[in-house]
Amino acid sequence: MALFNRTPIAPLDYTRRLWMRSWVGLVLLFLYLPLITLVAFSFNDSRRNIVWRGFTLDYYDKALNNASLMEALLNSLTIAALATLASVVLGAMAALWLWRFRFPFKAAAEGVMALPIVVPEICMGVAMLVFFAKIGFPSDLVWPFNLGAITIAHITFCFPFVTMVVRSRLTSFNREEEEAAKDLGASEWQALRDVLLPHMMPGLVAGALLAFTLSLDDFVITFFTSGPNTITFPVKIYSMVRFSVTPEVNAASAMVIAITVLFTTIALKLQSRMGISAQGH
Amino acid sequence: MAEKQPIIEIRNVSKRFGQMTAVDNVSLNIMPGEFFVLLGPSGCGKTTLLRMIAGFELPTEGQVLIDGQDMARVPPNKRPVNMVFQSYAVFPHMSVTDNVGYGLKIAGVNGSEREARVKEALELVKLDGFGARQPNQLSGGQRQRVALARSLVMRPKVLLLDEPLSALDAKLRAQMQFELADLQDAVGITFITVTHDQDEALSMAGRIAVMNKGDVAQLATPSDLYEFPANRFVADFVGSVNLFEGKLTLDEPDRASVDCPGLGKVYLNHGVTGPHGADVWVAIRPEKIYLHVPGDGKAIRGAAEDAPEGHNFARGQIKGMSYLGDITLFDIKLESGAMLRVSRPNISRHDQEDFTWDDKVSMHWRSDSPVVLLS
């Protein structure tokens, strides 16, 4: 009988055991069921969005034609792009600084650097609100400069993540490679560009990805720093949900999920390719 | 013709890291075309000295001159020397060709000239055809050749090698020792190698500086270093040696005698420069001692042929034996209680059967074999 002819399960071959498989399945279900429901109901042909009434793409159409929702999405993407760029540059510089130099109170500096990660978001939000009000940050600039306050706020909590990721990547760097570059005639800057940066690249990509997603879906801090003309996507969704949860919200959310998944996939692809070529030694 | 100018001059160089003195007032002249080896145990300052030549460390005191020019204000990327690092430091994200061509690219050498020089360098280290490979597709030995080619392609005045063979397995190391020496012959560049391995140093070097605790203990050719060590540190570090404390009882221009409580009376057929009655050490290499079964001719006479009666002769019992194929090592307990190591070549296929544990043996050595050391 086929049931008894299969190869026996080895002691450490956990992935072939029924209980292990069911457990993994349950975990995945727990993680993804809400998301699957959200995406599924974005195709639901019903305003109430509680019972399945049939398939439709109407709400995607509606969401894409909702000017204020699209404006919010554009704001969010712009902020995320700017914040990511600035966070990667700042984060990489901070990581290099912490890795390269020895100076007094270095441990304290590292702690302070990680503070925005551990401080509760609500505190950061209030602090930002008070800060921008106190210094009188202009709120009536033209787009995209009116996003300045939110972008700055996002950079403050995004760049420490980049620093952490890049810092840990740097610990595996062989200093002799940098010395070899200099020995072959490279200046400090050329050595950084040709040897250190390629080594940091997977860390930079991962950090950028982290910063982008953190910025894109931040609600609390953004809520405190956004004005009537600077609504971001999560804030907009929140205000829509307060009236009613229509499939339009689902459709919009599904689109953001798609964007995030796309970015993550690209980043992981890039990273694995670089990971292979950065091995050796 | 005027005397040749040294390519590297190290003048009274010291290097301190905080409280620790890594290099202590060292002066060395290295001549063009030399294969120079810095030999010493770990922490003796040899790598620090090499890094000061390369420019990665600056001397606390003293001067480093390359080709007559003071290097105090010259950064590593402007020095006419190149280095092969202990980890090879091959750039992992570049192909072999890009690795070897990197220095030329920085120097602005482009197009067909760069291509030709990279190709030539790869042929020199026997890596032709490997240009398109990535470093992670190479073995350790091949990566080292890439590092060599990458430095040689720059046509440096001096090539610095930091423990070049330490990461290779024994067979490959032996092969690379010869290849490095051949390569140095072929390119005519001055090589300065740092190593802690005395076999490596002896087989490759033209001259060796043995370093100990930041100081040069002896500077000599390989055979002088081995046969005429200047002090106990060198005698012990280079090769293996039997050391016995003794008193100088006779010191004339053509002969000398040392009375060693451990070894007995040692006679030398040359003079040593030391005061009568001084405390000295006698060093004798294991392979320079002849082993006999007691009762053969020499044992009966109780003396070596070229020494007075009762000198250069000892009796003992074999306490330890290790058969190494080409030679057999014997640890012999002398009548004085001291231990003596003797090595014996296995010239015939049955030589190792001549002696065994607990055999009583007698030994003698020639009167030009022992070395008297004053420090």
Image (cartoon, coloured by chain):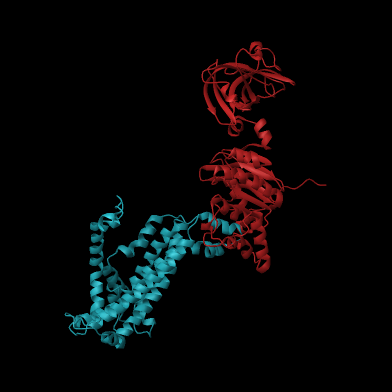
Q: Position of residue A24 (x, y in %)?
A: 26, 61
Residue in the image at 62% along x and 65% along y: B105
Between residue A220 and residue A178, name the one nearer to us.
A178
Q: Position of residue A105 (x, y in %)?
A: 40, 55
Left or right: B336 with respect to B297? left
Q: Is residue B193 above or below residue B330?
A: below
Q: Position of residue A223 (x, y in %)?
A: 27, 76
Q: Is residue A188 visible?
A: yes
Q: Classify the position of the C terminus of chain B by image quarter.
A: top right
Left or right: A234 with respect to B18? left
Query: Which quadrant of the figure has residue B350?
Result: top right
Q: Is residue B103 above or below residue B358?
A: below
For chain A, what colour was chosen? cyan
Q: Is residue B46 visible?
A: no
Query: Which quadrant of the figure has residue A221?
Result: bottom left
Residue in the image at 42% along x and 72% along y: A85
Left or right: B99 with respect to A49? right
Residue in the image at 25% along x and 83% along y: A248
Query: Which quadrant of the figure has residue B289?
Result: top right
Q: Position of residue B116 (x, y in %)?
A: 68, 63
Chain identifier matching the red colour in the rendered picture: B
Q: Is residue B351 above or below residue B164?
A: above
